[in-house]
Image (cartoon, rainbow, N blue to C red):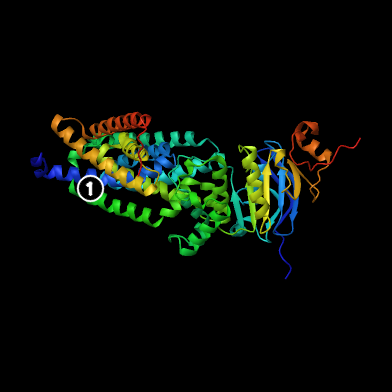
Amino acid sequence: MLELLQHSFMQNAFAAAILASIACGIIGVYVVVKKIVFISGGIAHASFGGIGLGYYLGINPMYGLLPFSLLSALALGTVSKKSKIPEDSAIGILWSFGMALGIILVRLTPGYAPNLMTYLFGNILTVPRFDIYMMLGLDLIILGTVYLFYKEFLALCFDEEFTTVQGLPSQKLYLLLLCIIALTIVVMIKVVGIILVIALLTIPAALSRKFTYNLKKMMFLSSLFGGLVSVSGIVFSYLFDLPSGATIILVLCLLYGLVGFGKELLERKGVSFGF
Amino acid sequence: MPEKKVLEMREVWVRYGSQIILEAVNLDLEKPEGLLGIIGPNGGGKTTFLKVLLGLLKPYRGKVKLFGKSPEKSRELVGYVPQYKRFDYDFPISVWEVVLTGRISHAGFLKRYREEDKLAAKKALETVEMLNFKERQIGQLSGGQRQRVLIARALASSPKLLLLDEPDSGLDPHMQEELYHLLGRLKKDMAILMVTHDLSAVSIHVDKIACLNRKLHYHNSKELPIEDLEATYQCPVELIAHGIPHRVLKQHKD
């Protein structure tokens, strides 16, 4: 086991897994309690346009991804609330628009697009050192924002209308929350890829909800679950030569199923959880 | 300086698309005390009416003033109790945290809640007799208790006007009676306006009644002409007046 850690690519992989788990553990809780899983999926997929743009311009695709994901968040947040068409239709349209744009841009780029699959499905074993620093910076921004806006985000998620009536700019707060979700998605893309981002954003948070009714404790627990599962997922994927992102998600789903089933069973016998 | 009117609505019209929801609504509340009950059928514009007062909806014609200012600018004087059934009661939030959100604009942006905010929240919970439940997650309360917590949240900001959206729906008669009793105490310190589709709400605690079904029928009294009720509900009044515990409606004239 320990010799695994001697490879520098493995060190990077573990660092990336842990940084991603912190971000998605905390932000995933907001996504789950405010029931904005679908819009988060929309941001993730629309962001693919940014990766395509990065390839097309010949820059690091992460540079294309970052502004594009923020733009997608703002566009989705505004259109879904303001437009006359139903929210889920608006999300569906922007979701596929970003994806299609990305595919066209990649196709228009001369030559072969290396690592394209990395962005779609993630490959944590190839995360470069630079990306780790970028993830660390984004994690700090995410943590700082949640620290500053904790009481506002809690009020917004529980009762958006009341927050407006209290005189707070709830629409702007909502857009800020979506932007933070976009940053979280950027942090996670190298770990599990665009297609599987939603799993890492929802499963650890949904799992933590089974144990506590306190938002802060939920954030802590869901980061912990995410971290443990991604690290063990990496080890499995290394040992059995499986794709890392998919392995992490499968372990997560398995754990969710087991915990859900086990808890149900124990509660029927009168054992109660929660702390 | 003469005291500002609590509420002044002049010829307020609201429409959604081509459909008119509120038609030429006029209403005055002079003093910050007393309980006004607004009854009307479902779809009669009751929630829209409240949204106009909260500044969430702009009428396309007419004037709305609360305490002499626009609804957006008078929000700190208004407490709002939404329909408690529309919440996700699995939400990870405690009674205490819910009531504190009623102080969110007082505490200030990006700041933690101060001692005086906590004191106000505590007082509000005492008023509705729910302080013992402050650590409970809101899902672990009965319907009547949830309703009280939402009232406490509105009271935390010491409003002069309290707006309630169908506070009595889904409560059993005993809990309804407790709720009216609470409102009866509160109405000495603030004006209370509650909308409801339930006529049994027209109990002894209500001071004045209005009927709302697109148009607002209001005669600045507790007595409700049968013609108004029939115009509002468009059905014989005997049907809807059946079973009112405290009879406040006029007897039929023969």
Please say whether residue A199 is visible from this viewpoint: yes
Q: Residue furthest bottom?
A: B1
Q: Residue furthest front?
A: A270
Q: Which residue is drawn at 74% across and 68% down?
A: B2
Q: Residue furthest right?
A: B254
| Category of crowding for the residue at label 1, using alpha-carbon neighbours closer than 10 angstroms: few (below 14), some (14–19), many (at least 20) | some
Say which of A116 and A183 sits in front. Answer: A183
Which image quarter holds the N terminus of chain B?
A: bottom right
Q: Residue at x 50, y 57 (%)?
A: B104
Say which of A128 and A174 sits in front. Answer: A174
Could you say which quadrant of the image residue A32 lies in?
top left
Q: Going by the image, does A224 lie left or right of A27?
A: left
The picture places residue A270, in percent across and down from the top left corner, at 37, 32
Q: Residue at x 10, y 40 (%)?
A: A4
- What's the chain of the residue with tag 1? A
Residue that mark 1 sits on? A131
